């Protein structure tokens, strides 16, 4: 089965195409066929003006047409398109979504922060990890941060916060926002078991790649602090030159580190695993489970 996910975030949009096959032992393999990332940067419009500009609307339309063409070329059987924080906050989002549907036939669903956290959890990142630990899923995006706390592979609590990298860059995160996040972590993220973090999002993925750690090995809180200390004084151009970052990564990676470090410090967490799985992966997995459930009901 070949499925696709479109994830329209505050910093970038992605099209992920996966093949889903069943191995001889009954396990499922989700194999990436293609991943396309477009730095739309909707948050720079929305978090400053409250709207998505006409130019950005044209960019979205061109991108969706391209994604539709790619899905046709790759013979995708089904897709789900989701938009997150920037589209949630945009005053003209309903108009934009209606126009996209009318001009391309692609229906985009604006999902809540809670739903975003739930879909991320559905990537089952912790399935292969030690059940003697509790886990805090941390996803830092351009517009929001999603936290999901689990023990024994069961969700204890989840919450979405309007603290994202672009909001921080635009000085749109208040002390009250930070206090809300801090209070949640200190009061809700508690366990008799040791707590380990699981990080998702493009910024933590990039830090993991820079670290050259082997897959399955965690990043320490101390290493994140060192990267922050190293990168924070540099200009965007200097980060681009020194690390080979694109501009749309060089400006947001430092505020992302700030969020990860703060959450881990408040929770007393020393390590974060980075499975390099994101919202698009979760969208495909939830789609597959939904299709499987519907097919069983029709039998």
Image (cartoon, rainbow, N blue to C red):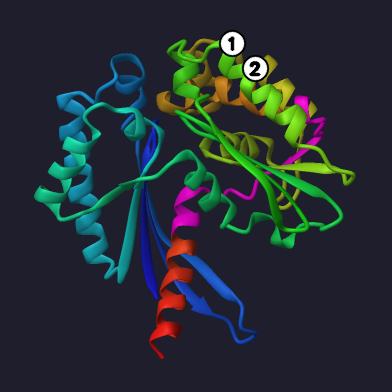
- Which image quarter: residue 255? top right
Q: Nearer the viewer, residue 111 or 41?
A: 111
Q: Nearer the viewer, residue 132 or 208?
A: 132
Label 2 element class:
helix
The residue range painted magenta reads 264-283
Label 1 element class:
helix
- In the rendered structure, the answer to whether residue 108 lies left or right of residue 274 reads left
Asked whether residue 273 is drawn in magenta, I would say yes
Residue under the point 54% across and 45% down: 117
Q: Is residue 264 visible?
A: no
Q: Image quadrant for the C terminus?
A: bottom left
Q: Which residue is mark 1?
A: 175
x%, y% of residue 124?
A: 62, 59
Q: Are marks 1 and 2 in contact (CB under 8 Å)?
A: yes
Asked whether residue 104 is drawn in magenta, I would say no
In this rendering, is residue 154 above or below 203?
below
Q: Which residue is mark 2?
A: 179
x%, y% of residue 127?
A: 70, 61
Residue under the point 60% across and 36% down: 204
Q: Image quadrant for the N terminus?
A: bottom left
- In the rendered structure, the answer to whether residue 67 lies left or right of residue 218 reads left
- Which image quarter: residue 226? top right
Residue situated furthest right in the rendering: 192
Gap between marks 1 and 2 measured at Cα = 6 Å
x%, y% of residue 184?
A: 68, 29
């Amino acid at each position: 089965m070949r499925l696709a996910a479109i994830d329209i975030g505050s910093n970038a949009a992605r099209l992920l195409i996966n093949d889903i096959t069943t191995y001889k032992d009954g396990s499922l393999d989700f194999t990436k066929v293609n991943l396309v990332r477009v730095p739309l940067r909707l948050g720079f419009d929305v978090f400053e003006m409250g709207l998505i500009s006409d130019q950005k609307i044209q960019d979205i339309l061109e991108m969706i047409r391209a994604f539709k063409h790619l899905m046709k070329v790759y013979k995708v059987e089904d897709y789900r398109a989701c938009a997150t924080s920037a589209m949630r906050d945009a005053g003209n989002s309903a108009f934009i979504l209606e126009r996209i549907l009318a001009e391309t036939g692609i229906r985009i669903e604006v999902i809540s922060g809670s739903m975003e956290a739930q879909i991320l959890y559905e990537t089952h990142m912790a399935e292969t990890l030690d059940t003697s630990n509790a886990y805090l899923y941390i996803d830092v995006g351009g517009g929001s941060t999603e936290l999901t706390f689990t023990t024994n592979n069961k969700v204890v609590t989840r919450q979405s916060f309007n603290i994202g990298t672009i909001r921080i860059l635009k000085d749109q995160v208040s002390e009250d926002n930070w206090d809300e996040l801090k209070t949640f972590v200190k009061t809700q993220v508690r366990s008799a078991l040791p707590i380990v973090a699981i990080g998702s999002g493009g910024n933590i993925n990039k830090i993991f790649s820079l670290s050259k750690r082997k897959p399955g090995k965690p990043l320490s809180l101390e290493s994140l602090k060192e990267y922050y200390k190293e990168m924070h004084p540099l200009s965007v151009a200097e980060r681009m030159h020194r690390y080979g970052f694109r501009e749309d990564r060089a400006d947001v990676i430092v505020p992302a580190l700030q969020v990860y470090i703060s959450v881990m410090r408040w929770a007393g967490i020393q390590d974060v695993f980075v499975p390099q799985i994101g919202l698009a992966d979760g969208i495909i997995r939830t789609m597959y489970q939904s299709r499987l459930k519907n097919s069983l009901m029709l039998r």
